[in-house]
Amino acid sequence: MIIEQTLIEFGAPSRVVHAEVGPMLIRFGVTPGYVQKPARGNQPARRERVRAAKIVACSNDLALALGVTSLRIEAPVPGKTYIGIEVPNPHPKPVPLPPLLESPEFQALAERGVLPIALGRDVAGQPILADLSRLPHLLIAGATGAGKSVAVNSLLGTLLRTRTRDEVRVIVVDPKRVEFTWLERVPHLLAPVVTEPEQAVEILGKVETEMAHRYDLLAAAGCRNRLAYNSRLGASSQSPLPALVVVIDELADLMMLAADNVERSICRVAQLGRAAGIHLVVATQRPSVDVITGLIKANLPARLAFAVSSLVDSRTILDAPGAERLLGRGDFLYLAPDAMRPVRGQGALAKDSWLKQTVKAAREAVPVDAPDPEAERFASLQSAAQIADDRLYARARELAQEHPKVSASFLQRKLRVGYPKAEALIERLRAEGIVEDPDLDDE
């Protein structure tokens, strides 16, 4: 065999003991052999086992011998006694999402899980499944065309297919404007699909306010999380709290516009959102440290890495190399929060026709003129930034009433804000007639 012969030529004799054929990959299981060491001085001749690191060092030579564009070596395969050599399948097959949802493994997860999602199939063809409520947030990264948006569409399609509007609500931020047009008028949406970055910052602030509202409900009821709160309601007239999934398709666009506000909102929701039933799915095609900051990484423990352009990007998203050797077109590495190593798989593909059928079925399940009090209440919420500004202005108005000759520098000292914010407060006070002249001395 080519693998065995190549390793023998480079001084690492090994034996292929296992092979698994997946949708896009073939993984060969290789067991290291022995080399004969000659006698030296007083030491007799002996047999020495080949080190795994020596086989890993032969990855480029194996790729050349096999004639493949990319080759990945996993040493060792978790839970196995052999080293995995993954090569592209010469006859690749896509992984359609509908059969994956009909598999017994997913059916069992859908019965016991809260927010079941199907990510794809691993190298052996087994389903890769997860419960979004247990992750509880997911970070997706990959270069353009690697499969991020397809993965997000499959995730949303799975939630719409398996959960009703009363069980899960969705907020989608789509700066590219074209990826989620199929979600138009779906009843699960808590707000229309957000396409403007300015609106996205406001929506994230409203999610913060919604999280604070849910925590007030949990504290008043004496419950630790959303599921306990819903079970305590029982047959009461109050409506249960649905899970809220916030999807951001391109984080880099938002970070370029308002990095401070976006990072603060994402970190606060990620830190406190689990008990309130709020879960984040954040995708970006530029996994650099100025986009995926240390705080964001720390609060989004589950990672889904598609093909990236460099080793630095792979270390940013996975804290380990490997994503730069992926094949693209849905080939991913999935790192669960409780896993030591990522799992390689092929992403599930949801066709547009199936997504449209899913949306049609979701619309038919809800009457056309049915009221949506949750969406109306969310639309009337103020963002966290607006609430903070109103509180700051209320304090500035109190100071203006106590000191008629208030100025911007005076507000800077008293409120501990910057000059632009203090000047904006002065202009607002002038508009309401509380301050006559902003240039008055503040003695």
Image (spheres, rainbow, N blue to C red):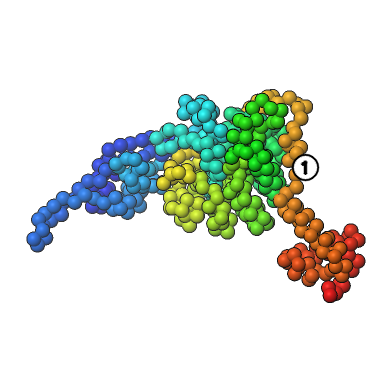
Q: Where is residue 269 in the image (x, y as percent from the top left)?
A: 62, 47
Query: Which residue is rendered at x = 34% and y = 40% of the image?
Result: 79
Instruction: State the residue position of label 1.
Output: 380
Is 363 or 18 nearer to us in this picture?
363
Query: Which residue is rendered at x = 30% and y = 37% of the image?
Result: 18
Q: Say what amino acid the circle numbered 1 marks.
A: Ser
Q: In which quarter of the image is the C terminus?
A: bottom right
Is 418 or 125 nearer to us in this picture?
418
Is residue 175 among the parts visible in the rendering? yes
Left/right of residue 25 with respect to residue 439 in the rendered view: left
Query: Which residue is rendered at x = 58% and y = 59% of the image?
Result: 290
Q: Is mark 1 on a helix, strand or loop?
A: loop
Is 78 or 421 nearer to us in this picture?
421
Q: Where is residue 39 in the image (x, y as percent from the top left)?
A: 10, 57
Q: Up-down: is 42 above or below 176?
A: below
Q: Up-down: is 312 above or below 161?
A: below
Q: Where is residue 102 in the image (x, y as percent from the top left)?
A: 51, 25
Q: Position of residue 250 (x, y in %)?
A: 62, 48
Left/right of residue 46 with respect to residue 96 in the rendered view: left
Mark 1 surroundings: few (<14), some (14-19) or many (≥20) residues within 10 A: few
Query: Which residue is rendered at x = 73% and y = 49% of the image?
Result: 383
Is residue 277 among the parts visible in the rendering? no
Identify the image quadrant of residue 408. Answer: bottom right
Q: Up-down: is 149 above or below 404?
A: above
Q: In which quarter of the image is the N terminus?
A: top left
* Total numbered badges shown on the rendered structure: 1
Q: Up-down: is 1 above or below 383?
A: above
